[in-house]
Image: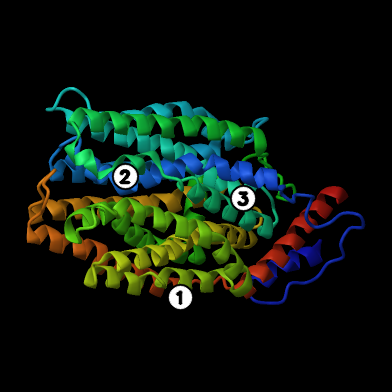
Amino acid sequence: INNGMSAVKGHSGSTPAAIPRLPNRPAHPDQKLSVCSKLCFAIGGIPNQIAGSATAFFLQIYLLDVAQINPFQASMVLFVGKAWGALTDPVVGFFISKSKWTKIGRLMPWMVGCTPFLTVSYFYLWYVPPFTSGRFIWYLGFYCLYQTLITCFHVPYSALTMFLSTNQKERDSATAYSRTKRRRSLIPQCPQCAIENVRDLIDMSSLKKKDLYMIAAGVIGGTFLLCTVVMFLGVKERDDPYAPETEKSIPFQKGFVLVMRHGPYIILTASFLFISVAIQLVQSNFVLFCTYAVDLRDHFQNIVLTILLSAVVSIPLWQWFLERFGKKTAAFCGITWIIPFIIMLVLIPNLTVAYIVAVSSGLSVAASLLLPWSMLPDVVDDFRLANPFSKGHEAIFYSLYVFFTKFAAGISLGVSTLCLQFAGYSPRACQQHPPVVHTLKLLIGVAPVAFIATGVVILLMYPITEEVRIKNKFSLDQLRLTLYCKRIVL
């Protein structure tokens, strides 16, 4: 046991001490995940990704042109909704950390329980009420409710990665399955994208367009119910069998302080905070940019689908790349790849360049989706090795990470929509004034590049290289075995 505890000291820089393994007892239990389990886990996240993409690409233009609230009110809906969603993340993380283990796990009841209410809130987010004076309150209320419920689903779903297996490769593989299947689910088209696929909607009656958005919302809501059932039936939530046995999990306040003092977590969160803001700016303003700034309104739906298809195809590529060269190198290469192509789209706005940019952007979108969720479990393992007798902190890591990214994205969305109002944006107009066009080019080009560059500079300081990750894995295996030996002795 003393030799085993010396493995923990290896975390600070010395070589981990090897200890004899128990005969007929591996350091890891048999937690190799089947393809079926990985697929069910991935299917469980599909509706969240579809709904997230639909709101990212189309909610802004929906509020402006279909619901017909003014740009200031739309910016307030987007900002307050995102900020509210961000604030609920640590609250949900707190209650999850206090949850008791049940027959179906500690995280699964949260996802199963919130799904029916999540479906209803999403549907009414895309419903145009018959009154006009209170529409701002309507959309603000349902967007905040939707953000609360999606947090109750997304935080435990993300943290579930840590409870699928103790094996790092199995967790990385499950994450890759999740990101690939969730993006592939958008290929043929997400329902909201299908609505915009026919540009003669401009000539359709307002009522018809509203009905199509409602149908699309109903379809997405149905996928929430169906996919959650599949995940519930096909995924088994497992606690770490070699974790220290404690009567209760680590207190949330203590866990919060420990997490916020953990350097790798702060660096990773800060880096992808800026990168997420950049991706969010591009997604939320892309439809407006293609429609009013570069005269690609007849092609933008195909360009969006090209981005999604490129992202789906490239996720396995990035999974191979991170296994071959390490996650930090993959993140650096994948995120910076988009910068020259964004600049090309703004400076050379033609159809050929737009498709080239779409394919290249898909590569970076895939990297931004896969890598933070693949790197976060490594940070949790690093924390567990530095604090071997703390338990129940996984929800804190994931909820705070989502909190920071959501809050920053909310600010960026609100500010970008407000900038459009100051520039003189006119809802449902066939053309916009030159200041609006210039503003859209700044929101698509200059601002995302600046945020990505900042995030990449911070990422350079990320200390968990591939060598450190392998070393942590070895030390954590020894610690788990030591704790198991201790239980046998006692």
Crowd around label 3: few <14 · some 14–19 · many ≥20 (10 Å): many
The residue pinned by badge 2 equals 197
Instruction: Measure how far apart labels 1 and 2 are at the Cα level.
Output: 40 Å
Q: CA distance from mark 2 to mark 3?
A: 39 Å
Q: Is residue 117 above or below residue 462?
A: above
Residue pictured at 69% horizontal, 48% vertical: 35
- Compared to residue 445, the image places residue 58 above or below, namely above
Q: Amino acid at mark 2?
A: Asn
Residue occupied by mark 3: 162
Q: Are marks 2 and 3 in contact (CB under 8 Å)?
A: no
At label 1, counting other C-alpha atoms closer than 10 Å, the crowd grade (few under 14, some 14-19, many 20 or more) is some
Q: Position of residue 429 (x, y in %)?
A: 11, 46
Query: Which circle's residue, 1 or 2, is located before the other in the chain?
Result: 2
Q: Kindly report which numbered mark, 2 or 3, lies closer to the viewer in this rendering.
A: 2
147 with respect to 2 (left or right): left
- Disc 3 marks a residue whose amino acid type is Met
